[in-house]
Image (cartoon, grey):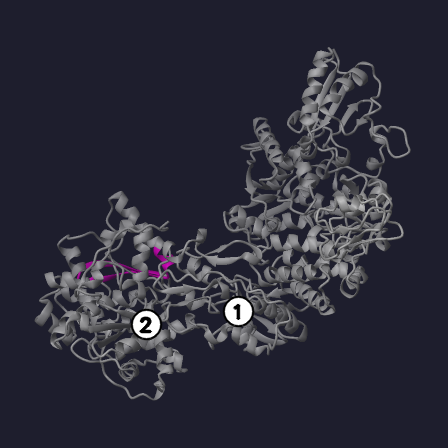
Amino acid sequence: MPANIEVKINGNAVQVGRDSTILEAARLANINIPTLCAHPDLTPWAACGLCVVKVEGSPKQVRACATTVVAGQNYITHDPELQETRRTVLELILSNHPSECLKCARNTTCELQQLAADFGIREVPFTYNVKRLPVDDSTPSIILDPSKCVSCGRCALVCQQLQGVWALEFLNRGDDTRIAPAGGVLLNESPCIKCGQCSAHCPVGAIYEKDETAKLLAAIRDENLHVVVQIAPSVRAALGEMFDLPAGTLVTRKIYAALRKLGCDTVFDTNFSADLTIMEEGSELVARLSKGTGVLPQITSCCPAWTDYMEKYYSDMIPHFSTAKSPMMMQGAITKTYYAEQINKKAEEIYSVAIMPCTAKKYEITRSDDMCASGCQDVDLVLTTRELGRLIKSMGIDFVSLDEESADSPIGKYSGAATIFGNTGGVMEAAVRTAYKLVTGEELANVQVDAVRGMDGVRTGSVDFKGTEIKVAVAHGMVNVGSIMDEVRAARDKGEEPPYHFIEVMACRGGCIAGGGQPYNTDDAVRAKRIAAIYTDDEISEVRCSHQNPEIIEIYEKFLEKPLSDRAHKLLHTKYQPRPLYVK
Amino acid sequence: MAIKNYILVCGGTACESIKSDAIYQNLLEEAAAQGVAQDVQIVKTGCFGFCEKGPIVKVLPDENFYVQVNPGDAREIIAENIIKGRVVQRLAYKEEGKKEAAADEIGFYQKQYRIVLRNCGLIDPENIEEYIARDGYLALEKALFEMNPDTIIEELKTARLRGRGGAGFPVWMKWKTTREAESDTRYIICNADEGDPGAYMDRSTLEGDPHSILEAMTIAGYTVGAHLGIIYIRAEYPLAIKRLETAMAQAKSMGLLGQDILGSGFDFDIEIRLGAGAFVCGEETALIASVEGKRGMPTPKPPFPAVAGLWGKPTVINNVETWANIPVILTKGGEWFSSIGTADSSGTKVFALTGKINNSGLVEVPMGITLREIVFDIGGGIKDSKQFKAVQTGGPSGGVITSEFLDTPIDFGSLIAVGSMMGSGGMIVMDEDDCIVDVAKFYMEFCVDESCGKCSPCRIGTKKLHGILDKVTKGKGTLADLESMQKIGTAMKKAALCGLGQTAPNPILSTMKYFEKEYLEHINLGTCRAGKCKELVQYLINPEKCTGCTICARKCPSQCIAGTKKKPHVIDQALCIKCGDCLSNCKFGAISTY
């Protein structure tokens, strides 16, 4: 840990880390410097020009976001002159931005709108010059509206630096600058993996999730449809933020209640299928380990953005990929078969809805024919956490005061292992808990697997399966996956032992708790709180391991027979195919 | 057979574009045909600087200076000058009202002092031996065997050399910081991304004396501990690139570049990277991004390249003109260099003198010379005896300097004090026919085109400023627009990310300061005194002077002039496209502009 140094913000001493920026130092001193491009997840891009501050004794103004503090230096963050500069820069930005707040995806959550409100902008003294550029709604997940873009660069940086996807790039120069896939192709023709981190980081409404809430209302209205809904593990740790609850408030049972209030007929939990995934994926791993069926390491496949990335950037890893579908798709398939049978409905009569932290999930439901294992589309609609939050508000539901309810049976119960699917390391930990039982025949004494917890982008470790060392690796934030894949590839090419047996990958930093569809203003502090909530949910669970979930035991007895059975394969497993980076 | 004469033919880009290569070839053929091939050595050199009168041919030792030479003149030059020893009068340069002048007497050269351009127009840039004959690579030898990194930096400190790219940062400090920055690898970069409108100092230096740059970069490599240098040069400079490549190959073959230079054990190599011509890539962080294969966009400083530059490693980055000074400083000493110029700025500065001036061209002057000397003594005054209006230095980042400041000595500090800046060396002279608002608009248009688009103050600010200027030149400006320009300009200076955006408002702010009256005339009176702003110009026929000759009506392309023969004509203002054909064709002075 680098030692702290003392600097002054407007004359007040503050202790900060040696590598802190002026912006970070000011925040520690409870001083808010306006910014539009800076984001704690990203290296400073220094584009917006709003965070200029004065360095005492220097004639130049510097950017607080990109300037490292110097010990003993006094920084002036606010005075009338700075205010005038900021106001002019803000007016310049506003003069190129459509004043269409009322029908914008970011109305009331827009950072530019907030700045305009704070600065009391009543008119913009410069000529309006809003470029009307075509909206890109080519993907099922996100919409890019370049007319609203303020060129802050956050989306491109997150796409390049955190995700390593490089779907978004700056095109053209000067006044014609816009952000879009290289070559000006559409997003669905680009390497975009639909993770939606761009939409979670955009300060304005230039790139946002496709809002499909109307489809849910239409389905609820349709008397011929039985609406069944599932909620993903991480949604329960984040949705509360949209109702001003502190980050990390667990709202699982309020969500069940809200979904029933909205008019959904049956409320299940994706966590049930997270347990199911562990049974299938864990058994697959055990098969690979013991019977030599398939290659090692086995790599998790529950993240659709990662799957898409692998198919584009690492398609030679297809044999390593677990064939198990994601929990959401398993839940959809089981809903439209096992559950449909129980309520005497045909698959077509069920409208299957998933509440997800993720925009890529909107893509996943049609990614291949395997997503129609029930004979029709297994999941009909995906709503992100943000969409659900808005829908709850618009439907007049007072979320915070809702009574707590339970999920429905027979596919609504979950173990603690399932809920930790929501954060990085969780799938691995859940798999270890069950694989240990499958391999050794014994239960793990301490189910908390510290080796795979934490926030480092890549974590490796090993777990002792009674004398057998199982080597594992966890990566999150798509850009971090490269080093592990390269390791695997190198060993494979040289014919050496694989460096790992099992690898977990989640596309987003922190895992699904910080997915592209989660509430805005996610940073590492928020991530930590959501992760803590998820682990709490695990700890308070009666059952901590997937194979102990009574509804899981029941479904294998009644319907699936055993993991990797023919029926399980038909409903719960899928295939992969190489995909080109650019379609054109 | 001894060589009696040397014929130097300018091989700079400007002269090559008007057939100087054909002159060179013809001279070779004629010398052979007329049997004097053994008596004369014909050399294609770099730029002479006197581009106004190109192509230039100079005959030594007579110092006969021929201007605007055609390929067909080769026969006469050989026959008259070389064989008969007589000056070819019709080609010899004559200053107004004077007889022909020998090259060393020409006014254009009188106040110049050539350090950077020492070899330009003198040696064959494609022949390393000619460079060596002029003390080339002596400085490198001295650096490697007689000096050490500390003494080299000390020498530069004594010389007080400041970077010639525009900002004027002390060179020794850059080198020292790079040398002392902790790292396993360091790099040297030559910034040859010359981009100011009308500027070609660096191109000419590279074309005329490429070895001086290679030598200087190698010295820097030795000094700071770098083993690779990059020359970042615009792809639009093919001749400079070719000569650099030739020079690099020659230097390598002679052990002056590459492994174990001169047996010293020091390795240094140079690579060329072509830029696509973006002005912003002259900004060092954007240049580095471009070299790394990224989009050419600046990043905030600090960290400065001397600490974290190319690939994050400490990097010395200087521009061509700065590099060209280095070898001379080492051979002649820092004291000597420091004795030239002013207390603020030592040495010389090369300017590309253009605009409404008689002798446009490349000039190198000692720091401290006044603008008046450059414009009137070297530049020969304003074309067509018009009135001097202003001179723009610093290109799109600089400002105008008016006649009241003509006696300002040229150095970094003085130019900033009068509201302009040194810049990289563009110097554009304006006369009474130039509209100051139009000039400001020209520079802003350049900045709009060249803004990289990264930071909002520059991306949006340049566009807004240009829009307002456009309004003003069309007579639609308001007094509030002047306030807006001041406001935007001030914010850009403070909040733009890089030098391009921070200085882009300078031409506007400076012209608004010194020529406020002209702005107000455009706004309040709807007039443009220079007649440049077409929308504000009205062509009127004075009925008292018009003889009804009908020539204007017949020449008018929009047929907006009516009238019968021998009766005064009238222009229909609604149809007039302000082409000015009527004015230029009227023989009776009956048409004027308002």
Tell me, yes or no, whether dots 2 and 1 are on the same chain. Answer: yes
Residue A461 shown in magenta: yes
Question: Looking at the picture, does residue B61 appear above or below residue A103?
Answer: above
Position of A93 compared to B504: left or right? left
The Cα–Cα distance between marks 2 and 1, rounded to whole angstroms, is 27 Å
Q: Position of residue B538 (x, y in %)?
A: 78, 56
Magenta-tinted stretch: A458-481
User: Which quadrant is the C terminus of chain B positioned in?
Assistant: bottom right
* Residue depicted at x 26% and y 66%: A427
Q: Residue type at mark 1?
A: Pro
Chain of the residue on which disc 1 is drawn: A
* Residue A263, horizontal then vertical, whole percent: 27, 82
Q: How many marks?
A: 2
Is residue B458 part of the magenta span, yes or no? no
Q: SS class of the residue under badge 1? A: loop
* Residue B81 falls in image quadrant: top right
Q: Is residue B505 above or below residue B582?
A: below
Labels 2, 1: front one: 1
Residue under numbered circle 2: A383
Which residue sits at x=45%, y=65%?
A41
